[in-house]
Image: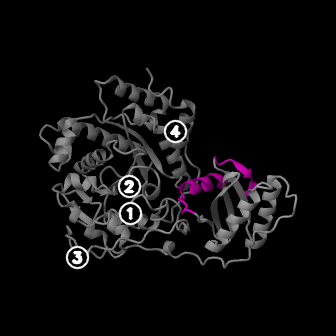
């Protein structure tokens, strides 16, 4: 009896496993003690963290005297100044709005106009591209991963962002639309404000909504 | 220093038992070892110290930037073995924080641990590969995945692999030490078959040769607040975790981890 047989796609599991063993040809991070995002990481905007629990009322017993060891806070905790809310109205679309891809292309053009985005792509909930941007196709998996990690607050648009270059931030905005969950990935010069994210989410939702829906 | 997150997709797979006894094995071998209880259930602390709920710990460090690492360190009778308990603020953020929310703070913790001169830091993480656990893995050099040797546990393997692949996107240098089969029952066909099936389906490098048997000794050891290897009748378990330590060291050396030295001269 093979207890795995009915439950697991052996070839898919093997592929996943082998990719874990593959050497990633990523540049060695030698100038930073950090693993992971590196010092350029500016944090996640999605979901405000809960307030910290208050510290214990009295110093709890410690095994050793306090040392001079201090917390190594870095510029990681200093977020970049957010972009001022640019006007990004959900542009009224003309009658006869055309097929989905045409509407999404209009949305992309408006997004680029209003935010200075250098790249825009949209994925479905499986991570498959609905609208690609060849210059940033390497970002698809990251965007999907970030979107999956993000836990939306009911009724609110949310986003997750990560700095990917000197003046480039990948903003990931998961949006529920009549077309299903879409994940917008856009590469912008600076993190977007919550207001702008809300407008973008509304515009994408409108663009993905079929005529008459 | 090498930091290893001990993480699993599913809870109740023997992660804490593996963490405690593996840390004990590294410490016995002479490495300055820090075992961090990042599981909000605080099982490491509850297993090893009766006062764990009175100690400041990892979650307090996350919650309060003013706490120095030194205040968290709990020495043990073995000079090379030090603990950090989960702490009093361990209900803080349980299950609530999105991935990335604590990344900077966890990294700060790892830097402080390294600066304190530890050779190895093992972190017993909460179950699941998201939220704080993902931040810990993304701040660690390597990850070890205990997996219960039974069919239901094995069925969670695809999700575990997907989770690790996601984490490798944000931490490409993460070394996946592999799956550690736990609670293996050689006298039970389903347990044996689960082990065999997993070994067939996964590449050999991704399943550790060493396996942790299900043994009542672990319960006894926990009741007495000790690693199992300390018990008089614990020689067999000691040998298992020594073998696990040697296998992990071999993997780290093969991976060419630059800051890991077997002689503790990291």
Query: Is residue A193 in view from this perspective?
Result: no
Query: For the N terminus of chain B, which image quadrant?
Result: bottom left
Q: Earlier in the sequence, mark 1 or mark 2?
A: 2
Pointer 3 and pointer 4 on the same chain: yes
Marks 1/2 in contact by CB < 8 Å: the verdict is yes
Give the chain of mark 1. Answer: B
Task: Please give the name of the residue rendered at 52% of the width and 55% of the height, measured from the top-left corner.
Answer: B171
Direction from residue A95 to residue A74 in the image, left or right: left
In the rendered structure, find residue A17 and report the number of the disc placed on it. Answer: 4
Of A199 and B43, nearer the camera is: A199
Q: Earlier in the sequence, mark 3 or mark 4?
A: 4
Pointer 4 and pointer 2 on the same chain: no
Direction from residue B102 to residue B181 in the image, left or right: left
Cα–Cα span, label 2 and label 3: 31 Å
Give the chain of mark 3. Answer: A
Magenta span of residues: A126-154
The residue to which callout 2 is attached is B3
Task: Tell me where residue A136 appears, x and y as whole percent.
Answer: 70, 57
The residue to which callout 1 is attached is B110
Q: Secondary structure at mark 1?
A: helix
Residue A151 falls within the magenta-colored stretch: yes
Camera-near label (3 vs 1) is 3
On screen, A37 above or below B164? Answer: below
In the rendered structure, find residue A58 and report the number of the disc placed on it. Answer: 3
């Amino acid at each position: 009896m093979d207890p795995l047989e009915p439950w697991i796609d052996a070839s898919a599991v093997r592929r996943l496993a082998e990719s874990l063993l593959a050497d990633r040809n990523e540049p060695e991070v030698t100038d930073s003690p950090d693993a992971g995002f590196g010092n350029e990481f500016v944090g996640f905007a999605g979901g405000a963290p809960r307030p910290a629990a208050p510290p214990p009322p009295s110093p709890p017993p410690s095994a050793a005297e306090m040392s001079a060891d201090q917390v190594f806070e870095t510029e990681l905790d200093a977020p970049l100044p957010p972009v001022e809310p640019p006007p990004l109205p959900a542009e009224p679309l003309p009658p006869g709005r055309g097929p989905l891809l045409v509407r999404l292309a209009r949305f992309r053009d408006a997004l680029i106009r209003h935010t200075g985005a250098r790249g825009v792509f949209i994925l479905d909930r499986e991570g498959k591209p609905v609208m690609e941007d060849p210059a940033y196709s390497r970002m698809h998996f990251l965007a999907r991963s970030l979107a999956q990690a993000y836990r939306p607050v009911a009724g609110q648009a949310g986003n997750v962002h990560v700095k990917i270059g000197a003046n480039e931030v990948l903003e990931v905005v998961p949006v529920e639309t009549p077309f299903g969950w879409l994940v917008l990935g856009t590469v912008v010069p600076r993190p977007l404000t919550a207001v702008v994210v809300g407008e973008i989410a509304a515009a994408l939702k409108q663009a993905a909504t079929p005529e008459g829906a | 220093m090498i930091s290893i997150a001990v993480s699993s997709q599913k809870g109740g797979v023997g992660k804490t038992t593996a963490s405690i006894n593996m840390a004990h094995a590294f410490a016995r071998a002479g490495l300055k070892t820090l075992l961090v209880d990042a599981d909000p259930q605080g099982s490491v602390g509850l297993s090893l110290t009766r006062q764990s709920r009175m100690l400041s710990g990892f979650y307090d460090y996350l919650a309060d930037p003013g706490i120095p690492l030194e205040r968290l360190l709990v020495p043990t009778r073995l000079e090379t073995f030090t603990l950090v308990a989960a702490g009093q603020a361990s209900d803080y953020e349980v299950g609530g924080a999105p991935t990335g929310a604590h990344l900077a703070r966890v990294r700060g913790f790892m830097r402080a641990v390294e600066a304190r001169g530890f050779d190895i830091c093992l972190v017993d993480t909460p179950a699941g590969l998201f939220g704080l656990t993902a931040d810990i893995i993304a701040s660690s050099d390597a990850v070890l995945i205990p997996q219960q040797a039974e069919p239901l546990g094995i069925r969670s393997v695809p999700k575990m692999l997907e989770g690790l692949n996601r984490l490798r996107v944000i931490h490409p240098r993460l070394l996946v030490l592999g799956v550690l089969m736990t609670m293996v029952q050689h006298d039970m066909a389903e347990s044996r078959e689960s082990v065999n099936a997993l070994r067939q389906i996964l590449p050999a490098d991704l399943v550790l040769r060493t396996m942790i048997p299900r043994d009542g000794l672990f319960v006894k050891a926990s009741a007495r607040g000790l690693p199992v290897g300390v018990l008089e009748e614990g020689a067999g378990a000691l040998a298992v975790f020594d073998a696990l330590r040697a296998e992990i060291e071999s993997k780290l050396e093969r991976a060419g981890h630059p800051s890991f030295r077997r002689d503790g001269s990291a």
